[in-house]
Image (cartoon, helix red, strand yellow):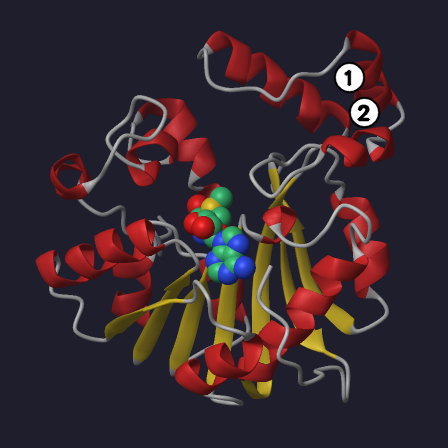
Amino acid sequence: MPTSLFIPPPRQVYDRLGRDHFGATSYATYNYLGGGVIGKVKTQHFETALGLARTMGVRGDVVDFGCADGVLLASLDNLYDSVVAVDIRPDFIEICAQVVADLALSRTTTLCTEGLDWDQTVERIGAGSKSAVFLLETLEHIGTRDEFYESKIAFLQQVARLLAADGVIIVSVPNMVGLSLLAQRMVLAATRKYREPLSMGELARGVVLRDVSTLEARWSNDDHLGFNHRALEVALQTSFDVVHRRNIGVNVVYALRPQVATAPKGPALQG
Ligand SMILES: C[S@@+](CC[C@H](N)C(=O)[O-])C[C@H]1O[C@@H](n2cnc3c(N)ncnc32)[C@H](O)[C@@H]1O
């Protein structure tokens, strides 16, 4: 029987430390630690991402970029020499720091990037120093509406500055088109969780034609609306090699390597 690489942190830690997240005690509890089939399905991207990293022989020092309240940190701390837990939200990083202390994750440190530009972020984490950056369920929230995919690629290029030679970015994004979109909408409705508003026409277009481009105008950093991993894959071709791709239904997980000379320098704020 295959062993699990993802180690769910004890729920009690979050019940004690977390803050309200859509009625749950934390982001981690709301999304992953609720148990049951949904909890299992939702944590699959962690298992897949960690499995991909193992397949690629990742060892040493890694980053969890967009770590939220740290649900993956116990797993990473168990597998790697050092882990930097990075998030732009100070409230999440505060919880991460507590989780690190409570679970005695001695290889993990935390960094809040709020107000930091990329040069400062890269300097604090260490340019060219990491075997892998895990960027899970985060890229779809990044960038601008006007340059929907270009801005996400620009963000990845900055993240790539952290990689050592042969380093890899492990990315997971939601699969928000086709039957997966329909299934998610049905599960969210059945479990009374938040759903971005969609008309029947928009839903039909997204499910049947796998076209959500008309929704991009309503995208915001807090939402997934309009995100299409297939369009991301086209945009990736300009600067990254997709070394592995795993479509696991509700998510798609990639292992990316930057093509040569893809990482620019620049003081632009993250986002
Ligand atoms: C949907 S959560 C994903 C959390 C976790 N990686 C997971 O797989 O569930 C996205 C996280 O990315 C963080 N984030 C968004 N933009 C960011 C940025 N520019 N720099 C660092 N973190 C960012 C958010 O604060 C949030 O915690």
Residue 230 lies, in percent from the top left, at 81, 46
**Crowd band around label 2 with a 10 angstrom C-alpha radius: few (<14), some (14–19), many (20+):** many
Residue at the spot x=15%, y=43% of the render? 17
SS for dot 2: helix
Amino acid at pointer 2? Gly
Q: Is residue 65 left or right of residue 250?
A: left
Amino acid residing under circle 1: Leu
Q: In x, y percent, where is residue 158?
A: 63, 75
Q: Choose between 176 and 122: the one closer to the eye.
A: 122
110 above or below 194? below
Q: At 62% from the left edge and 79% from the top edge, which residue is drawn?
A: 267
In the image, farthest residue toward the front:
115
* Rendering quarter of residue 220: top right
Q: SS of the residue at dot 1?
A: helix
Q: Which residue is mark 1?
A: 203
**Disc 2 designates what residue?**
206
Q: How many marks?
A: 2
Quadrant location of the C terminus in the rendered image: bottom right
Disc 2 + disc 1, Cβ < 8 Å: yes
